[in-house]
Amino acid sequence: MINWQKVSPLLLIKYLLLLFVCIQLNLLADSRPNIEHFDKNNKVFEFLANNMNMENDIIKGEGNVTLITPSYFISADFALYNPAQKEIEIMGNVHIFKDETLYLEAEKVKIAFDDNYALLEPFYFQESQTGIWIAAKNAQIKKDEYILENSLFSSCGVELPIWDIVFSEGSYNSEESWLKLWHARLRIFKQPILYVPYASFSLNKKRKTGFLYPSFKDSSNDGFVWTQPFYLAIDEQWDATFTGMLRTKRGYGGEIEFRFADDRNQIFEISGGYFDVKKDYQKQYNLVNDHYSGYQVQYVRYDFLKDYIRYFNEDGFYIDWAGVNDIEYLRLREKGESGLDIYDSLLTSRINYFLKGKNDYLGLYSKYYIDLSQIDNANTLQTLPTLQYHIHNSPFFVKYLNYSFDYRLNDYWRQDGYSILQHEATLPISYTQSFFDDYAIFRLSSTFYASKANYYSRDYEYDSWLHNGLFYGNYYTISLFSDLVKPYDDFLHSMHFEVGYTLDGLSKEHGIFDWSLVLPNIQERLNMNFSQYYNFYNSDAWILHRLSQPIYFDDYLLEYGDFENEVNWILNRNWTLTSSMFYSFLKNRIAEVSHDISYNSDVLALYFGHFYRKKNTRFLETYFDANEANFIHLGATKKFNFFDLFGSIGYDYKENYFRTWNVGIQKDIRCFSYRFRVASETRPILTTSGIRPQDNHYMLLEFRLLPLVTVPYKHNMRG
């Protein structure tokens, strides 16, 4: 029973409209002449019209003609029914509905019920998911197959389609949504540009087994490049893609992607590939490897084992594990480097699992690193694995007193050299009290930390000097902070003030700690932080401003750390400005600065960015950062009626060279898109003498006839 008090007004209107339509249909059915046709006690169709009469064994229906079958609802102006031949001819504004949506339009439809056969003149059909329509002078339908002649199809507007494909003969299977064409001509604005004797398309998004569209390009280094994928739809849960690759100068290879959807629709994906490099190509560029290979496994699943472990109420499993023997393998993949965790030539793989309870947390993590700039990674330190147990912030005997606890077991392993087994424990205890009606909050905390490093190796040469390390100590933090919020007529303003003082306590260190083991920086210091936020009511504008200044005390000497000033400003829906600056008091100069400003509207997009970092000037608590960068990046896109212009550059003004640049023209509309791009980038390649940069200049031309096909062509001018 419906509770009408809880029904929304919109839903109530829908109920009333549905009731009105049902009443009208019943009245109309009762008032119009009605003929029903049965086949072995099953109703084949129901024929209704305002006026019906019989002439020479032909039943004529005129005015509001309706034909109802188990699958279709058909309306028209006029109909002729021949009971002897079990044929009905429907004419004038014929509309055929299927599953409550318009399925076909025609002026004349002839249906033979015994053979499940129909003839439509002229014929119009539109696929609801993709928007593709087919128009023909006539079409014959037998069961689920449409036989078409002198037809065309497109997904653009019917009046003047940007593109269409005209074909002399064809067939369309409505059950599989598959269209086959013979003697097809692709036209742009009615002008023919391509002829193919045969073509085949799927007109919906349902997965089907078959060859996907190939891609082509040519390169001065690789020669002619051809990539051909084949898609295998096993069932609703499984599918796979096999991709063959040919580079006439470099070699050939292939890649396999396999995907599986579990019972919660989480995707498990595994991929791998192999590419064989020709010997003369390897010798010409002094390459390390005579083949490229790699693999990747990805899967995320929550509540993986929760049902089997009662104590924990949440768990999750995550894997993103990859391995490659050469960075060139990533460039040969269809996906490129996307989907991989790569930062500064370091590829990181992970396997994580966690169990989370009400008061505690248990985690198991593994990380594996591949330095793509190195020929051999035998000395790279891996995390295999880390075991963590954590107790959330909890009361500690008395009011306002809280504690938390964290323990980690880290196994840092490598193939060559020594490995490290590290134990870490952290226990912070804090007291928090508010004053002056919560305008001020005081916090006093003491943090205990201990770490033990055990070294092990199959090479006994390290035993003479590498001794296990032990470190323990504590430090105290006193902080006072306040959060203030005040509304004004036009905006809301909030401020956060915080002053924290850290004092080192007892600390002892024995043995040796490897440089890779990060111990807490227990150094006497004062941190001062201020942030404010403006939110303007009647616009999209807001401002976030942050200031930070650490002060270090070392042997009673006062040293100012880097002063940080950061601003994020959304001026309106078009303009965005971000700026950050670090000033080094120790070096008496700006250590790092970055600015980014962007403008976005319906017809114009602009971007300008600048980044500067001085070598050995940016102070990171215990050392100066040796990295240096000096570059600007700017880009623009302008939209016109029939095309968009775009371009960008990245320029290193210290080394005086363009890191990247590109310029081009493109247009994206509902049914059609194209792009032409000329670009340059610098990329590394792995040689026997190490990593070296290689310039890559190329042209890319791409056409997309949405939603059918993407035709890309790439020409590498160099690289």
Image (cartoon, helix red, strand yellow):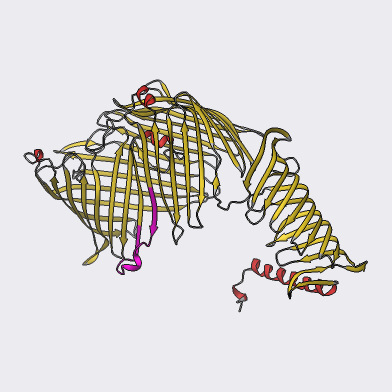
**In the rendered image, the vertical position of residue 660 relative to residue 366, given as above or below:** above
Relative to the observer, which residue lies in front, 42 or 158? Answer: 42
Left or right? Give the position of 192 relative to 424. right
In the displayed orientation, state which residue is furthest to the top.
656
In the rendered image, residue 38 lying in the magenta stretch gets the answer no
Which residue shows up at 30% across the image and 39% down it? 370
Q: In which quarter of the image is the N terminus?
A: bottom right
**In the rendered image, the vertical position of residue 351 relative to residue 361, given as above or below:** above
Relative to the observer, which residue lies in front, 504 or 304? Answer: 304
Q: Where is residue 281 in the image (x, y as percent from the top left)?
A: 39, 25
Left or right? Give the position of 379 relative to 93. left
Which residue shows up at 35% across the image and 23% down it? 283
Q: Where is residue 217 in the image (x, y as percent from the top left)?
A: 52, 30
Relative to the observer, which residue lies in front, 532 or 237? Answer: 237
Q: Give the range drawn in magenta.
A: 297-316
Q: Quadrant of residue 17?
A: bottom right
Q: Can see residue 432?
A: yes
In the rendered image, residue 307 lying in the magenta stretch gets the answer yes
**In the rendered image, the vertical position of residue 281 relative to residue 346, given as above or below:** above
